Amino acid sequence: MAAVQIAFDFDSSRADAARFGWGWLRKTPAPSPVASTPLPRAPVTASSSPARAQDTTRREASAPAAATDHEPHTTLGLEAQLRASLGRALRLTLTDNRRTMISLRKRPGFTELRLHHMFLRADASTVAALCNYVGHGDRDASLVLGRYIEQHREGIRRRPSRVAQLSTSGVHHDLLELLAAVNGSHFDGRDDVRITWGRDPQTSKRRARRSIKLGSYCSRDRLIRVHPTLDAEFVPRYFVEYIIYHEMLHHVLPPVVRGGRRQLHGRDFKRLEQQFPLYAQALRWESDNLDRLLRR
């Protein structure tokens, strides 16, 4: 019988390790572990116990303890609380995952629960919410957990930053020149962001693309990446400027959280995006030339 998996993800895009968000209940047949991904600083120590060798509890992460106004749980103590509340056999594993904070699998005879080590510092109300989420998939409980994760995100391990090799001079478009023009016209000449052509993932044996991400912004590195397919004679200057303008808005506008969900393109973002002088023309050009871009 396939295991049923429920996961609570603290999401972050690959291009931006400083983006935050959380997802609601997600149930999928899952024979393999939940994937991990990004974010902030160093972990919390899970207390050990002499009885640990006879117990099914495993520990995968340890780190310096964060400040708290109540005593931290031990791994075995937290497992005992959850087992008593759920009324069924439970196996608890602590993780140092960058993305998946809670992962649940119902196996024959017991439940396998994986928690980020931050939950060793959870207060009684958070533990109660955890029980309701794990036991019943309660949406209100997921909101409580989402807030707890957001408040303790400093305990989520950061992905090591990589020094990006910048490439700004193209055959047809110079990104430094275009960035300076966009900044001077719309952002008061800000000089706190960098830009580069991205890497083309296509190999020499090209397959037709099904989608393309023309630009991205990494807040951790304050870096805009522009897809190299735009460095072409048929791509107008104003369209590359529009892509840069869009990514600059991500640089100056923080994401907003509404109803527990993180929005990158909120109302203010969309309103300012439409103030780009050739906004409608840029969207029309993209629509008319998308197939051509995908074939490059």
Image: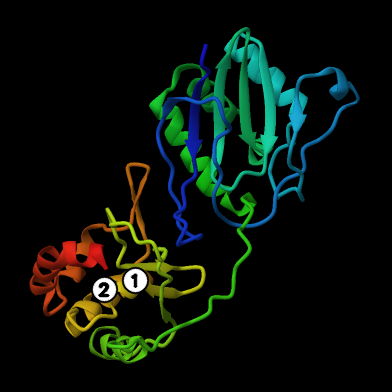
For label 1, the residue is: 227
Give the Cα separation between the discs numbered 1 and 2.
10 Å
Q: Are marks 1 and 2 in contact (CB under 8 Å)?
A: no
Disc 1 residue type (three-letter) = His
Q: Nearer the viewer, residue 175 or 45?
A: 175
| Residue bearing the label numbered 2 | 243
71 left or right, relative to 287: right
**Residue type at numbered disc 2:** Ile
Task: First in sequence, mark 1 or 2: give its number.
Answer: 1
Residue positioned most to the right: 50
Provide residue 247's location: percent of width, then percent of height.
32, 71
The x, y position of residue 240, in whole percent, is 24, 79
Whether residue 36 is visible, yes or no, is yes
* Residue 30 image offset from top left, x and y in percent: 50, 26
The circle on residue 22 is: none
Viewer-closest of 36 and 290: 290
Q: Quadrant of residue 266?
A: bottom left
Q: Quadrant of residue 120?
A: top right
**Left or right side of 131 for 176:** left
